[in-house]
Each structure stands twice: as structure tokens, then as C-alpha cells.
Amino acid sequence: MKRPFLTLEQAEQICQRYPTPFHLYDEQGIRGAARALNAAFAWNPGFREYFAVKATPTPGILKLLKEEGCGVDCSSLTELMMAQRCGFSGQEIMFSSNETPAEEFRLADQLGAIINLDDLTHVDYLHQALGHVPETICCRYNPGGVFSLGESKEGFQVMDNPGQAKYGMTREQLGQAFTRLKALGAKRFGLHAFLASNTLSNDYYPALARILFELAVDLSRQTGCQITFINLSGGVGVPYRPDQPANDIAVIGEGVRRAYEEILVPAGMGEVAICAELGRFLLAPYGHLVTRAIHEKHIYKEYIGVDASAANLMRPAIYGAYHHITVLGKEDAPCDHQYDVVGSLCENSDKFAIDRMLPKIDRGDLLVLHDTGAHGFSMGYNYNGKLRSAELLLRADGSVKLMRRAETPEDYFATLVW
Ligand SMILES: *Cc1c(COP(=O)(O)O)cnc(C)c1O
């Protein structure tokens, strides 16, 4: 059963200052997740989490994660600029982008960030853009084919399609990229791969680690390059549905440690640092989209119209993603009404829930959409002239801090030429 991290009374109090809809984040939850992650990998002295900025590009969140020892993983110019303004520098910044413009490589290099190259052809592109290659550099691997884990009667625990993904280099290209980078002056190398998204399995990271560790041993023998870090990237998921079991990050860290001791240590590579670029795992459960029921409609189905829309949270509309809903103040009421909970966009996909069993909803009720802390606000957009909402932080002491104000019509009109 999913419980919101705020009560109806707290929510109504917040609404007096910040009207719905808004995104609210739980400081304690975020800090707890970051600490659990760091503890799970404490066996690796060089371990660092580079929070994937695209999941929640909000300075108030990034600074909090910085206090917990995290770096940032950026993938665009403005994400790099935000990281810089939040006080991240040098190797606290990973730059894992693709189809990257030259000016973005230049800013990443000026900041001293670790650049993660997505393709073999980017080696010379980077060299041309910078006039040199950085001494520390990373390359992204794509093994192709289908990646799956844990077959059972119910199907695979994890299944994704690297062979259809636009990212990364083939094994052969990695050898060429390392050799070329070394000839151009690179001294320390990293390997990166992202094979499956939102995995609910403690085996994903260890399986990925095994692939990358064996590859690292192989590549260092083939090219003579010194591999100093392995980046396991994102992909550790969260249970969006109440009946799904959560990952155990301590078990995941232990699984990676076993692979490390079996593969890297015997090969004389026991100094390699592990990196992660988790976004969803650190933030998703600790964000709520809070919205108010403003309409009900009875036609061929029962509809509840809320004041948030897919412009605030796009995942249900574009992926059919499930986000659990709690009606505040009715946490323990029986779920004996079936609703479509819908936003106001002129798009029939603007449905937060379809045929969802919920307590009876009255106009004016406050609804929490769960697990919106990552890839929630950040994927928002301005379709139908909808304005982006505020982002608020619920602190450990119960106070609320504004991290981003809601957009106004003036913001929306600011770029127009009349
Ligand atoms: C999106 C992304 C991440 C974060 O993924 P999560 O599923 O949020 O953990 C990490 N690294 C890269 C390169 C990404 O594109």
C-alpha cells in the first residue's frame, strides 16, 4: 500500500500559499535514498553517484544531493550551466549526452567535466571542437541484441532492446575509440552502458557490471589503456504499482561487489572506481504531484477532472505509465468507485488514470499522484498554453520551501514577437 508523505491538513495549508497543481518533494526521503545508495557502494572507495539532472533539473534538489556527496550527470548545455551555478565542478560532473553540439563539448571541457562519448565518430569531432582530447574520457557501450534477465513462467524480469537503441558503440568500435583517444593524449578511461530502463530486479546492476567488468579487462589488454572507472549509469527502477516489490539497493551493491571481486580484482584492476547515474531511483518516490478535483462528469464513463494535466506529468499520456493516486483524507476509505481521472488538455490521452478504483471523489478533493519526483515536472511542456507549476520542498521540520515558482502568462509570452 502506498502512503503519501503528506496529510490532507498539510496539503490544505500549503495550498493557501501555493495553489494547485504543484510538485512537492520530500527532503528526508531523498536524503535517505542517497545515503542508502552511498552505503551500498561504500566498499568501493572511488564510488560516486552522478545524479541524472534530466530527471529533476531543480537547483534546490541538486544542492541537496551535493550535500550528500553526489555529483551530477548532464546531457545538455543548460544542464551543464545549472550544474555550474549549483557549485559542481571538475570531475563532479559527468557529461553523458548524444548527438552533442560542439559548443556543449566545449563547455563540458571548460568545466573539467568527464565527457562520455556516445560514438566512435565523436572522437575526432571532440578533438576538432576542443583542439585536444581530455586526459580523462569515457565511452558508451551498446552490446546490441536483446538484454534480458530472470526468465520465469511470467516472462522476463527485465527485458530491453539495446539493438534498437540509438546509443553507444559496438565492441569493435570501442577498441578503435580507445586506441585513437590514447594516441590523441587521453590517459584515463571509463566505460559506460545503459541497457534497460526502470528495472525492478536486484540483478540488473550486477549483470550489467559483469558485462562491463569483463569488457574492461578485455579492452585494457587489447589497447593498453588504463581503465580507471566503470559507469553503471541509470536504470535501477522504482515500483510505481503498489503490488510491485521495491529494489534493495544494499543487495544490489553487494551483487556488484561480488562481480568486482570475481572479475576485476584477479585481473589486477582492483582500483577501478564505480560510478552511477541514477535519476529515478533517487527521486521518483519522493515527489508528489498535488492536484485538485474541479469537475465530475457522467457520460459513458465516470470522469474526474483535475487542475493538473499531462503538461505537468506526461508519463501516463505518452507511455501509458501507471501512477498511483491517493485521495487525501480518504486514505482508508474503500476504493469502490471506478473513474477516469483526466486533465484539461485537448488530447484524449490526457488521462492520469483509466478505470481506476478509488474512493468516492468529491469536487474540491485533493489528489496525490505518487512517484512523480523523477521524469515528472522535467518532461512537462506548454501545450494548450498550459503553464508549468511550482516545485516545492517539504523539509524534515515540516516547513515548505519554494524551489521554483509557477510560470505566469508573462513567462509564456516572453519569447513571442508580436
Ligand atoms: C536518463 C539517463 C539516466 C537516468 O536514468 P534513470 O532511469 O532515471 O535512472 C542516466 N544516464 C543517462 C545517460 C540517461 O540518459
Image (spheres, grey):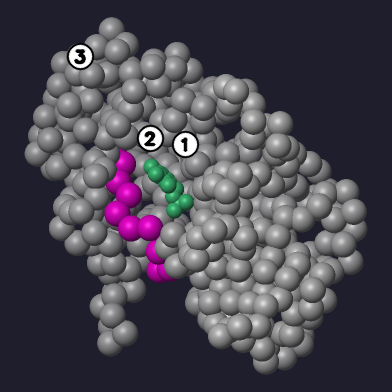
**Which label belongs to residue 9?**
none
Which residue position holds label 1? 73
Query: Is label 2 within 8 A of ligand 1 (CB to nearest ligand atom)?
Result: yes
Q: Amino acid at mark 3?
A: Leu
Magenta-drawn stretch contains 191 = yes
The span from disc 2 to disc 1 (Cα, nearest Å) is 7 Å
Residue range corresponding to the magenta coloring:
190-201
Q: Label 2: few (<14), some or many (≥20) within 10 Å?
A: many
The span from disc 2 to disc 3 (Cα, nearest Å) is 20 Å
The span from disc 3 to disc 1 (Cα, nearest Å) is 25 Å
Q: Nearer the viewer, mark 2 or mark 3?
A: 2
Quick check: marks 2 and 1 in contact, CB under 8 Å? Answer: yes
Q: Element under label 2?
A: strand
Q: In the picture, residue 163 is in which quadrant?
A: bottom left
- Which percent across, then down, holds residue 33? 61, 55
Q: Element under label 1?
A: strand
Q: Amino acid at mark 2?
A: Ser
Precedes in sequence: disc 2 or disc 1:
1
- Which percent across, then down, holds residue 370? 63, 65
Q: In the picture, residue 14 is in which quadrant?
A: bottom right
Q: Residue at x 27, y 18 (%)?
A: 126
Q: Element under label 3?
A: loop
Query: Is label 1 within 8 A of ligand 1 (CB to nearest ligand atom)?
Result: yes
Q: Nearer the viewer, residue 352 or 119?
A: 352
Is any atom of residue 357 visible in this view? Answer: no
Residue placed furthest toward the front: 418
Look at the magenta stretch and give its main secondary structure.
loop
Which residue position holds label 3? 184
Q: Residue at x 42, y 63 (%)?
A: 319
Q: Is residue 291 above or below residue 295?
A: above
Q: Nearer the viewer, residue 219 or 266?
A: 219
Q: Residue at x 24, y 41 (%)?
A: 168
